[in-house]
Image (spheres, coloured by chain):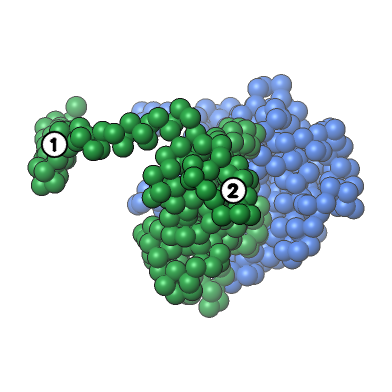
Amino acid sequence: MSAEAIASTPSRFSRRTRLIITLLFAAIISWVALDLSLGDLIPREGGRSVLGLFFEGALSPAMTYEAASVPPGTPPLIDKVFDAVWTTLLFAVAGMSLAMVLGLVFGFLGATSWWRDEGDGSPLGSGALRKLMPTLYGGVRVLIALMRSVHELLWAILFLVAFGLNNFSAVVAIAIPYGGTLAKVFSEMLDECPRESARSLRAIGAGPLKVFLFGLLPRALGDMSAYSFYRFECAVRSSAVLGFFGYPTIGYYLKLSAENVHYREVWTYLYALIALILLVELWSSRLRERIVIR
Amino acid sequence: MSDPAQGLKFHEVSVLYDGHAALCDVNLSVAPGEAVAFVGPSGSGKTTALTLCNAMVRPTSGVVTVNGEDLSQVSESELRSLRSRIGFIPQDLGLVPNLRVSQNVLCGRLGKEGLLHSLLPLLNSHSQEHERVLSILDKLGIGEKLFHRVDSLSGGERQRVAIARALYQDARYLLADEPLSALDPARAREIIALLVEVARDNDLTLLLSMHDIELAREFVPRLIGLRAGQVLFDSAAAEVSEAELSELYMLEGEDRVS
């Protein structure tokens, strides 16, 4: 071992120890500051009976309305559940399709591997684009960060105020943060995939767009698709929760039933949501297995 | 053919990486249609010499000319069109493993044709271009692999795909960096013979880098021996002496004794 290596060993060790102590302190401070005590989780008199009622519902989810009477012409509960599941799926697909467009465009512009000079000549030539690209890239990275840093529920609040309760505002609320996340991950996948194909295409005179399409994209496509399917699963959950704001997805009906203390109906919707998510997961994991090539 | 402006020339070429000289004052010229191998131990500058020819590496000093054009003077777009006339088979081959053989070969023309023109045959497997690709693959003995994915092929087959891509490119030059390094001895013989043969049949100027001196002597007409970035010998394969060979592969430091 060289003298430098011996000298640097204790200092690296103590740096790691310092980090662990800092993280432990952060955890302790947060618990003390929030005055958390496990006793809070023990339900009081009234709470206990509500909790009992709630978990009873789990064993006997409602197949018909719990209310004593429903207005004439109301569709059966099961129809409503299927409708809610279908709408939840529709919002997820619509939001995800717009997110994919945003993710692909900004993922491409937010990657550097197709245009940055790696010492073998600038792929962008010597024109204006070469001067413009670093600025465009920087702008896109900032935009991606802004899109992702606000949660879809907060975007939903913003669009509810701006556009009112229409379906498009919910789709955009999903599409913006999801598009930002896809763009970030896509650009990283494009920049981290093996470079030798891209380099060999540059060596025979292919321009940046062709290097991207034939040298980089095919090598990242498997990972990009697998990640997109995973994000679609997340989009189904987001779509369900957006119902809390009044969009006609599962969350909307779930909230109504909970407010009316119809816990057996709540469980019907919960089971429907779980079934939907399991189905989507099953489908996407099958597809992912087929796509990812290692 | 013997136009002095044609061919490839190095004039006093040096390449420095982080202060360390990969090539030092190298002069050489290669006439059109010649087949030349850079030979020498690891780190002797073979790959650097080869990649100077398509400007994937730039000289620190000196001039590299291809067909009379000084590579340091051409614009980026001229460089692209020049590169489209120089086939290049890197040591890792640079193929896209999860695309088909046909698609990889079709990529050979990416430097020559417009985006749309190069995109269409890649998506349509019944295009006329496929006929040409198939005839090239047939000549190289892997016609039946046309629609196989590259990652399902053996090392020798992949090497042939890389050669097919360079032939489809319709280049005037072919650079191959250590084309035999991943192959067993029998396969290596086949591939070097094939490279020299297709270069001759297609009137290509062939430049190789190799560490297997015996195969180089047997198949390549002219050898340039590099040692520590300097040209030790540059002569016809038959004229390379045993003394030159032992000097080429002598370990660092041994030369101080002799």
In this view of the protein, which residue sits in the foreground, B47 or A281? A281
Which residue is located at x 54 percent, y 50 percent? A70
Judge from the rendering whether residue A141 lies leftward or rightward of residue A28; answer left or right.
Answer: right
Label 1 vs label 2, nearer the camera: 2
User: What residue sits right under mark 1 in the picture?
Assistant: A37
Image quadrant where residue B195 sits? top right
Q: What's the chain of the residue with tag 1? A: A
Residue B214 horizontal/vertical position (percent): 65, 27
User: What residue sits right under mark 2 in the picture?
Assistant: A80
Tell me, yes or no, if residue B206 can be seen here: yes
In the image, residue A155 above or below residue A280 = below
In this view of the protein, which residue sits in the foreground, A293 or A33? A33
Residue A23 horizontal/vertical position (percent): 16, 40
Q: Secondary structure at mark 1?
A: loop
Judge from the rendering whether residue A170 lies leftward or rightward of residue A89; answer left or right.
Answer: left
**Which chain is depicted blue?**
B
Residue B219 numbered mark, or none: none
Judge from the rendering whether residue B96 lies leftward or rightward of residue A168; answer left or right.
Answer: right
Tell me which numbered mark, 1 or 2, is placed earlier along the sequence.
Answer: 1
Which residue is located at x 36 percent, y 59 percent? A149
Residue B250 horizontal/vertical position (percent): 46, 28
Chain A's shade in the image?
Answer: green
Tell me, yes or no, if residue A96 can be seen here: no
Which residue is located at x 35 percent, y 52 percent? B19
The amino acid type, in three-letter code, at marker 1 is Ser
Residue B137 horizontal/vertical position (percent): 83, 39
The amino acid type, in three-letter code, at marker 2 is Lys
